[in-house]
Image: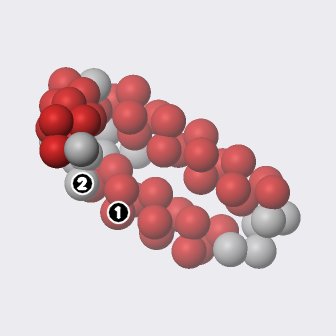
Amino acid sequence: MGDFMDKAKDFADKHDKQVDQGLDKAGDMADKRTGGKYDDQIDKGVDQAQARTGEGDQVR
């Protein structure tokens, strides 16, 4: 499992912009499916996830 995690981290580091865009899309889908009820919590989670990948948030 460690090798998989190393590869995933390496991918996220090299493709930060794409990972951040994917996280944004996932957050938008979660907002839509919950009718925006948890918008603030979802946005906060997406922002935290983006800050932990690659060089940080590249989208916003």
Residue ID at (33%, 30%): 17
Could you tell me if the residues under marks 2 and 1 are in contact, i.e. CB atoms within 8 Å? yes
Q: Can residue 13 be seen here?
A: no
- Position of the N terminus by quadrant: top left
Q: Is residue 55 left or right of residue 57?
A: left
Residue ID at (38%, 34%): 19
Q: How is the image coloured?
A: secondary structure
Q: Which residue is mark 2?
A: 52
SS assignment at label 1: helix
Which image quadrant is residue 30 in? Answer: bottom right
SS assignment at label 2: loop
> Residue 36, how many percent across, how many down?
77, 66
Report, in whole angstroms, how far the alpha carbon at label 2 lies from the one at label 1: 6 Å
> Residue 58, how many percent across, how many down?
31, 38
Residue ID at (24%, 36%): 4
Residue ID at (34%, 50%): 50
Q: 57 or 54, which lies in front?
A: 54
Q: Residues within 10 Å of mark 2 (few under 14, many from 20)?
A: some
Q: Residues within 10 Å of mark 1 (few under 14, many from 20)?
A: few
Q: Amino acid at mark 2?
A: Arg
Q: Which mark is residue 48?
A: 1
- Position of the C terminus by quadrant: top left
Q: Which residue, as the protein is rendered here, is positioned at the far front?
A: 1
Q: Can residue 19 be seen here?
A: yes
Name above or below for residue 48 compared with residue 14: below
Q: Amino acid at mark 1?
A: Gln
